[in-house]
Amino acid sequence: MAVEMSYAADGRLTFGAVSCACGLTHQQPQVDVYVDAGILDRLPTYVARRGFGKRCVLVADNITYPLAGEACAQLLTAAGYHVTPCVIQRGEAMEPDERACGEVLLTIQDDTDFLISVGSGSLTDTTRINAERCGLPFVCVGTAPSMDGYTSAIAPLLLRGAKIHRKGKCPEIIVCDLDILRSAPKDMVVAGVGDVLGKYIALADWKIGSVINDEIYCSACGEMVESALKKLLDNTAGIRDQTEDGIRALIEALLLSGMTVMIIGHTRAVASIEHNIAHLWEMRKLARGETPPSHGASVGVATLMVWPLFERFAREGFLHKPDIPALLAGRISGADRAAWLKHAYGEEAASAIMAENPSDFLADEEHARRIERAVTHYDNIRAVINAMPPFDVIRSAMEMLGAPMTPAQVSIDDELANLSMRAGKDYRTRYTLFKLLDECGLLERYLA
Ligand SMILES: [Zn+2]
Ligand SMILES: [Zn+2]
C-alpha cells in the first residue's frame, strides 16, 4: 500500500509517509487517531501528550453524556483537569443549529484551553465550528460509526433551518473506543456503511474524470480508500452483529476516507454524485420543514440508485456513435439551465451553485471535446467500471445489514428521487459518469 498503516500498542493508528508520484501535494495527517476496545480510560493520557492545558469544555447531549460524556468528565477530573460540561438537552436528536452552537459558545470562558466533543456528526460539527472560531484545540470522542466527518475541517450546520457549510477545525485527537461504538443504534451503523459504500462511486467518477479531463488521480489516496472498502465488504457479517472486528473495519473505513481529505485537501476520493443526491434530498426536506434522512442512509440509497447506470454504460457503451452536431444543437440554453437549477435546488441554492461553479455551462468546443474523448477512451472508462465490485455484492451487503434500500424507505418521494437523478450532476463542477451520460445524450434514455 502507498500509505503504510498500523496500530501502536496504545491503540494509536500510525501512518507512514505518503509515497505517491501523482503530482499533487500530499500533507501528512497531523491528527492523533486512537481506535481500540476499552481505550476511553486512556483519554487523559492521550490529551496530556498534546499539552493543551487543564481547562476544557466537554460538549455532549442528553444521549451521549450518560453514554460516555460523564465517564470522560470523571476521568479527566481525576487526572487534574477542570471540566465544564455543556450538555445539550433535546428530545430525540440534537441538530447542529445556531442554538446548539450558541450553547457551546456561551459555555466557553476566557480561560478555556480546549474543547471535547462526545458524539457523532452533529455534536462534532457543533464543537468544530466553536473550536475554529475560538482558536481552541479540539478532542473528538466518537460514539457511533455513522459518517465520515470525524476528520473533516468543514462543519455542515443549520442556520434558520437552512443548511450551511462553515470552515471548522479538524480535531487534534480522535478517540474511538470500539466498546462504545459497538453499542451504537443499528440505524447509525448502517448509515456509516452507506456513507462508505458511496466511495466506490466517488472513486470511479474520479478515475473517469482523469480519463476525460486529465484530472490528477491520487493513487495513494485511492488505494487507502479501496483497501478500507475491501476490508469493510469482507466484514459485513461482523458489522451486522456489531462485533469488535466488524465495527473496527467500519470506523477504519470512515476515518481513512476522511484522511484523504487531509492528505490532498479536497473531497474527490469520498464524495461524488451519490453525495450530491443526498445533499439535494436534505436541502429539499429542510425547505419543506421536514426532517431529512440521516446523511449516511441517504448516501447508501443514492449509491444503490446510481450504481446500475455505471454497469449499463460498461455493458452497452454508446451503441451508436454520438452525433456531436445534433447534441450541440439540442443543448439547453444558459437561461434554461438557470431556470432548471432554480426548479431543482430552489432560488438561493441555485444561485450559490452557479456562482461557485462558473465554468459549468460548457462552451460548444469543450462539450464536443469531452464527447470525443469519451468515445475514443471508452475502453478505459469501461475498465474503471468493471473494476468496481458487482452491483449485486453491494445490494446484498446492504440487504443483509437491513439498511434502507429505496428512496421511500428514507421518506423520499418518487418525484424528489427522480428529480435528484437528473439534477444531482449539476450540484458541482466535479466530473461524473452522470455528466458524461448527459453530455453524450444518454442520461434521459437511462432514466426513462
Ligand atoms: Zn458522506
Ligand atoms: Zn497522490
Image (cartoon, helix red, strand yellow):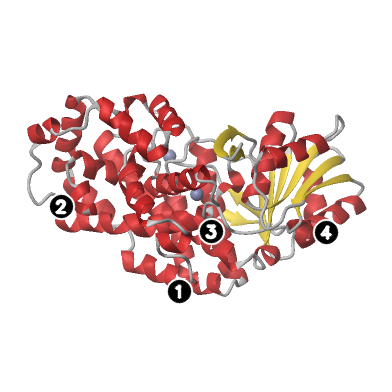
How far across and how far down the image is residue 168, in percent? Answer: 63, 35
Residues marked 2 and 1 touching at CB (< 8 Å)? no
Q: CA distance from mark 3 to mark 2?
A: 33 Å
The three-letter amino acid code for the residue at tag 3 is Gly
Q: Is residue 408 left or right of residue 361?
A: right
102 sits to left or right of 415:
right
* Crowd tier of the residue under label 2, counting other residues whose Cα lies within 10 Å: few below 14, some 14–19, many 20 or above: some
Pointer 2 and pointer 4: residues touching (CB < 8 Å)? no
Contact between marks 3 and 1 (CB within 8 A): the answer is no
- Which quadrant of the structure image shows residue 294? bottom right
Secondary element at image label 2: loop
Q: Which residue is mark 3?
A: 192
Residue identified by numbered label 2: 317
Q: In percent of the image, x 53 and y 58: which residue is there?
A: 192
Mark 4 or 3 closer to N-term? 4
Which circle's residue, 2 or 4, is located before the other in the chain? 4
Residue wearing tag 4: 71
Q: CA distance from mark 2 to mark 1?
A: 32 Å
Q: CA distance from mark 2 to mark 4?
A: 57 Å
Q: Earlier in the sequence, mark 2 or mark 1?
A: 2
Neighbour class for label 1 at 10 Å: few (<14), some, many (≥20)?
few
Left or right of 82, for residue 162: left
- The residue carrying mark 1 is 400
Q: Mark 1 or mark 4: name the one nearer the start of the chain.
A: 4
Dots 3, 2 in contact, CB < 8 A: no
Between marks 3 and 1, how big is the CA–CA gap?
A: 15 Å
Tag 2: amino acid: Gly
Choose the circle earlier in sequence order: 3 or 1. 3
Q: Amino acid at mark 1?
A: Met
**Tag 4: residue type?**
Ala
